[in-house]
Image (tube, coloured by chain):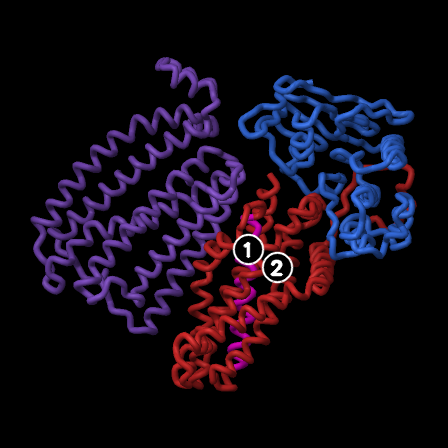
Amino acid sequence: MSDACLSLRNISVFRGERCLLRALDLDVSAGDAIHLIGPNGCGKTSLMRIIAGLTSAETGDVQWLGAPLRTDRDRYAQNLAWLGHNAGLKGDLTLLENLRFDNALRRNRPAAHVMAVLRRFGIESRADVMARGLSAGQRRRAALARVVLSEAFLWLLDEPFTNLDQAGQADVRALIAEHVGNGGAVLFAAHHDVDIPETRVRQLQWQTVDGQ
Amino acid sequence: MWKWFHQLASPPHIYRLAGFWAPWMLALALIGVGVGLYGGLIKAPADYQQGDAFRIIYVHVPSAYLSLLGYVIMAVASVIGLIWRMKLAHAVAVSAAPIGASFTFLALATGSLWGKPMWGTWWEWSDPRMMTELILLFLYLGYMTLHSAIEDRTRADRAGAVLAIVGVVNVVIVHYSVEWWSSLHQGQTVMNEDAVMPASMLTPLLIMIVSFSLFFGAVLFARLRSEVLLRERNARWVKRLVTGDASSLSKGAQHA
Amino acid sequence: MGSDPTDDQHSVVIRAVELRPLTVFAVMLGREWRLALRRLTDAINPLFFFAVVATLFPLAISPQRAVLQTIGPGVVWVAALLAALLPLNALFSQDHGDGTLEQYVLAGQSLVALCIAKTVALWLVAGLPLVLVSALIAQSYAMPVEAMPTLALSLSLGSYTLCALGAVAAALTVGVQRASALIALLVLPMMVPVIIFGTRAVVLASGGEPAAGPLYLLAATATLAAVLTPLAIAAALRISLE
């Protein structure tokens, strides 16, 4: 996997009529950490959604292993972990029930493994609490736990640091470093500078309209 | 072939093409309607059973035909738009919907005008064709409401396309089920299709069908033009068009 | 299928984890069922609605036995369909609101299987209970007991078709404000064949005649809906996230 796994070719991001980003080319390989940085409204989330394959770009295409996403969406998604603005938790299910569902659709690890991941995020004591009873920070941790549980190659984290305290933010940085160190790839969006320990982070920044 | 397809589908090209054909089609349609109406209302003899009331078929039948054709056009354009992601096809579907709905309404109105002297009532529930037309009108209204309810245009186009495709499968089932149902309730036989029409009645009807279709095409092209302009309002060729540089149209076509 | 938990603890690799669609279906159905049990009031409200609507007709038309017997099949059917519309609005809009819809689409597993599971779960929660209540209501409309099996079977088939088509409409209107009326406008015209076949079967059975004909037609429409709509639902859900 020395070559790029994920490539963006000539991608433009529009919001309604406005072009936020034009003709972006980007290659992502194993061991890459890429930080999309910019103020609110510059199109970070829109770009993330395009990379995830949720939205189709106005121009250009996203390629996974050399083929456009649309040719085999599912295969791509199996290697993708998505952290969106909403945690993706069902309020009427317990934290553990929520994550066991995601686990069942992914690697289907034993229950003890799921608990171990919860412990890592310091929320194992909340495992049997209905998700509606979790705090915003705990929901964020739960969503991050799902990312870890997926054991996916490519992580797309949209604003992973929001709602987290200092320790939580440090955890996320360590998590990204570990994933990249293990040969995974991470793209994350955050509006502030982020130092990831022992990791070279490529920053992707743009003024609206002109790319990179 | 593919290149031709793409050139045909480029917005400025379609804009120009539709602009060229629409007036001609409209003119032909108006002449045809004049000839057809003269033939149907004046030259053709009165029906031996229905008297002069039958003459409403010269509006009713073309309208009913176009109400179905409009939905088929919408569905086919939707399939093309969804599979080949061709935005122009969605513009065609969106433009066709209100025209098809209008003809559906016209078919219902003329049918009910005909029903008053024939059945003694404006609305006869047991007539299967009127029922199908009514359901078709609801399907059109559903499509247009859904399209206008979704703010994002791309999403609206694609969601509408899915609905149109589901609807076209559905309308076939609706048609047969309603026919089956009406046969249970002794629906009056109306406008017997098997009866042989004399040429003096049939020819004006065929002329009317062709003229109505041309009219449909002319209105579709006109609507398509404004739809294309609306969707492409930020494109360079539209800006040149508005600022009045006529020669730029062909350039725009190559550009896109 | 990733049964060994130790092999990739230290290196992340690209690989395919394709589950069988049946597994995906079972996992999703289990989750939806559990959710439904925790929101029982949501499931009960349509039943009350059904009963109340059916109560209005004798008041509005006539409490005479002969009249009730005539309108009975139609009232039960129409009221049941209207009641089955009620839960449609929440079907996908909740998933959209809490972010789980994105996770479903990006799970990389058969979205069609997920959609079938959602439809079946909806039918179990919103369709089947109506069938049970309909027996009570039909009784009060003086429907003969011999017609009950036909009523139950026809309503079961018909309500599945409604759930399937309703799921399409619900998926198409994800993110639309106040979508309930729009969903009804989209779904009800499409239910015409089901109403025709369903009421006909019950009328025949009430008169002591064989009702197999319309029941077969009803089964055919339900099968068609069950097979084709999941594709439309999956497509509509992907579109709704664009």
The answer to whether residue C112 is above or below residue C67 is: above
- The residue sitting at 81% across, 42% down in the picture is A137
Chain B in the picture: what colour? purple
Amino acid at dot 1: Thr
The magenta stretch spans residue C153: yes
Residue nearer the viewer, A66 or A212? A212
Q: Which chain is blue?
A: A
Chain for mark 1?
A: C
Q: Colour of chain C?
A: red
Question: Residue C223: in sight, yes or no?
Answer: no
Indicate which disc residue C229 carries: 1
Q: Quadrant of residue A191?
A: top right
C37 displayed left or right of C56:
right
Left or right: C160 with respect to A178?
left
Is residue A126 visible from the viewing direction of this image? yes
Tell me, yes or no, whether the two marked residues, 2 and 1, touch with CB atoms within 8 Å: yes
Question: In the image, is C58 to the left or to the right of A128?
Answer: left
Main structural element of the magenta stretch: helix, strand or loop?
helix
Within 10 Å of the Cα at label 2, are there few (<14), some (14-19), or many (20+) other Cα atoms?
A: many
Q: Residue C177: horizontal and vertical position, in percent?
A: 55, 46
Q: Position of residue C142 (x, y in %)?
A: 47, 85
Range of magenta residues: C148-173
Q: Nearer the viewer, mark 2 or mark 1?
A: 2
- The residue pinned by badge 2 equals C119
Q: Which mark is residue B243?
A: none
